[in-house]
Structures are given as structure tokens and as C-alpha cells.
Amino acid sequence: MVADRYYQCHKNFDEYQSEDRHFIIRIKKSTRKTIVTEHAVPEKSHIFLDVTALLGTKGINQTDTPVRVVGYRIDQVDYYVATDRLI
């Protein structure tokens, strides 16, 4: 599944993973990310963030299962995507 941030609902990420549905979804820059694991980012890359994280606010709408979050910059604009694909 590929979707844009308009369709973002944190609990959907848990649902997709429990159903073995693969996804890549652009998330809002302001989405709270509780980092579980940090991954190496190549130097001089357009990617500035590669982490495994829980999304949302604990006790309110936080995911139960971590997702991979990748942040990248194109033309001075930052974008973030969440995915279940860890490699």
C-alpha cells in the first residue's frame, strides 16, 4: 500500500502489520516519533533520518508495533515516510 499523510492514522499502522499488509505512507513532519533504533545514514545523502520508531503520543494514539521512519530532503523541503519494510 502506498498512501499520503492525509490518510494517516497511527492505529492503522498496527492493523496493516497484523494483517501482513506492506505499506509506505508519507507522514506529517509533526508526527511524534519515539525512537527505538537508529540506523546508519550515508554521508552527503538526501536521507537525514532512518529509524525504527513508535508513532504518536504514548497513552493517547501511539502505535504498538514500531515502524521504520525515513526522513529525506529534496529542494530544501523535508519529507517523512513510514513503512513496515525494515531492509
Image (tube, rainbow, N blue to C red):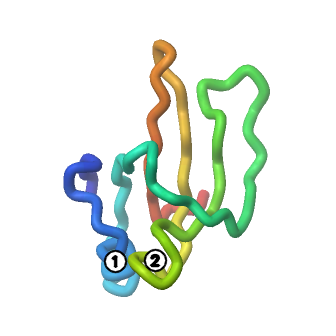
Q: Residue furthest top?
A: 75
Q: In what quadrant of the picture does the N terminus appear?
A: bottom left
- At 34% from the left and 77% from the top, the residue drawn is 11
Q: Secondary structure at mark 1?
A: helix
Q: Is residue 65 above or below residue 5?
A: below
Residue 61's x, y, as percent?
39, 76
Question: Would residue 81 appear left or right of 73 to someone viewing this image?
Answer: left
Q: Which mark is residue 63?
A: 2
Q: Which residue is mark 1?
A: 11
Residue 55's x, y, as percent?
49, 66
C-beta proximity under 8 Å, tags 2 and 1: yes
Q: Amino acid at mark 2?
A: Thr
- At 35% from the left and 61% from the top, the residue drawn is 23
Residue 74's x, y, as percent?
48, 20
- At 77% from the left and 46% from the top, the residue drawn is 40
Question: Would residue 9 appear left or right of 28 to someone viewing this image?
Answer: left
Q: Secondary structure at mark 2?
A: loop
In the foreground, 38 or 61:
61
Residue 38's x, y, as percent?
74, 56
Q: Which mark is residue 69?
A: none
Residue 14: quarter of image:
bottom left
Q: In what quadrant of the picture does the C terminus appear?
A: bottom right
Labels in figure, total:
2
Residue 12: quarter of image:
bottom left
